[in-house]
Structure formats: structure tokens, C-alpha cells
Amino acid sequence: MKDKSISYARKRIETQIEFQEKERKRKLENTRLELARAGISAYQRRKLTEAVNHFLTYIKILEEIKDVSPGGLLPSHFDAKQDLPELLMISGVYWDLVKLYDRTKSKERQKEFHHYLEKYVAFSKGMPFQHLCAEALRKYLTGDKPVHREEFRYAYKILSVHQCFVATALNDLLKPGSLENLRRYRDESLAHSVWGRAFIRFYYRVGPSLALQTDRLSPKTRRFLARVVDQVADRVH
């Protein structure tokens, strides 16, 4: 009889602990979006330390909810359809963290920058909003003089939905709209003729190699090539 009483008491305690844990996680779930929004607001007001604290707490809560180790949050932990607003929020949080850590100089902060950029790409690639994320990278490259230019350019290449390889490799030097004009010409003109489609197929075979060679050119030569691409884009517009 005594053993049964002990067993019953233990089960009651375990049930209570389980309930309290579920309640704690529920409260965390309710506060996580508030934290993310507070971080965005702080970032817009240039209260950067406050923004970072909110963003990191938001990510930490998600890691706890999904029961993953620190830094282990992945898109596969979410339902691509049901959790789309959350996935968009996560991508935006990582993007703001990437920009904040772009200017840091310590080795530890450099590692964090690379981690956040990898997460930004991971939570953007294959998503319905991927093209918006790629465009955010392009604008940052052309307008904000990033410190980690090569890393941003590589991320842009990964997220660029339509592979205009050489133009993408020169995107940080092109005039606004040039890349879009070339893509529009490809989709609205080249793709509608036999020779045009043949050219697209050929370009997709040799494009990656050409882009790699472009990356190895001197800054002066890259600027010259960018001017040529701009002229072509203006003519086909």
C-alpha cells in the first residue's frame, strides 16, 4: 500500500512538472514574436545593442521550443506552409544580425557574422520570398559598402533566382536595373525564339565558368566589364 502511495505521488509530481514545462513553453511561444518585433523597432531606431539582445533572445526561444542545440535551428524544423510567416521573420532577423555584425572587427564577432549569413541563406533559399532576400543583398552590395563584400556577393549568387551568371558576378558594380533588364530580355524575348532558347542553354553551360573567371579579374577590368554589361542592358531595355 505504501509503495502504491509513493508511486501515485511520484506520478502526480511528474504530471505537474510536465504541465509547468508545457505552460512555460507556451508563454515563450507567445512572447517570441513580441521580442522579434521589438528587435526590429530597436534596429530602426539605431539602438543596436538592444536590437541584438532581442534578436538573439528570439532565436534562443525558438531553439528551445524546437529542442535543438544553440546555433542548430534549421528550416526543416518548421512546416514550410503553416510556419511561412515565422520563416519570413527568422530570415529577416538573421538579415538584420548580418548587417549589424558586418562592421565588427574581433575574430569572435567575425565567426558570428559568418554564422548569421549562413543562416540567412538557409532560411531564404527555396522560400517563396527568396527573390526578396536576394534583392536585399543586391541593394546592400550596391548601396551600403559592406565590409565583407565577397561573402555578400557569394550569398547573392546562391539566392539569385534566375542565373544571369556574369551580370550577377558584377552586380555590385552595375547600375540599378541592369540585371532586371537583362533577365526581362531573356524571359520576354530570347525564351520565345528557337535561337534564343539555344543561346540560353549554351549560356547556362558556360556561365558559371565565365562568372568564376570574372571574379579573378582586376578591379579595373571588372569595372570596364560592368560598363559593357550596363550598355547591353540599356539597349535591350
Image: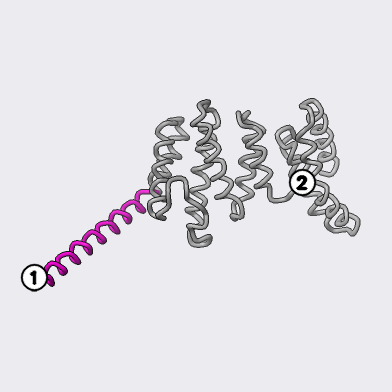
In the picture shown, does residue 190 fall above or below 95? below
Looking at the rendered structure, the secondary structure element under dot 2 is: loop
Q: State which region is magenta.
A: 3-32
Structure colour scheme: one colour
Q: In which quarter of the image is residue 149?
A: top right
Amino acid found under the numbered disc labelled 1: Lys
Q: Please say whether residue 4 is one of the residues in the magenta stretch.
A: yes
The N terminus - image quarter: bottom left
Residue matched to label 2: 164
Q: From the top left corner, tell me how far across and down residue 106 is, in percent.
A: 50, 26
Q: Is residue 10 left or right of residue 181?
A: left
Q: Which mark is residue 29?
A: none
Q: In this view, does 228 lie to the left or right of 151?
A: right
Could you tell me which quadrant the C terminus lies in?
A: top right
Instruction: Answer left or right for 149 relative to 205.
Output: left
105 or 57: nearer the eye?
A: 105
Q: Which residue is drawn at 42% across and 31% down?
A: 49
Q: Is residue 237 left or right of residue 89?
A: right
Circles 1, 2 touching at the beta carbon (< 8 Å): no
Q: Is residue 21 above or below residue 11?
A: above
* Amino acid residing under circle 2: Cys
Determine if the magenta segment contains residue 209: no
- Main SS, magenta region, reads helix
| Mark 1, residue position | 2
Crowding at dot 2, Cα within 10 Å, few <14 / some 14-19 / many 20+, comes out as many
Name the spot of residue 142 as percent of width and height, x first: 67, 33
Q: Residue at x 39, y 42 (%)?
A: 57
Which quarter of the picture shows residue 47?
A: top left
SS at mark 1? helix
CA distance separating discs 1 and 2 = 76 Å
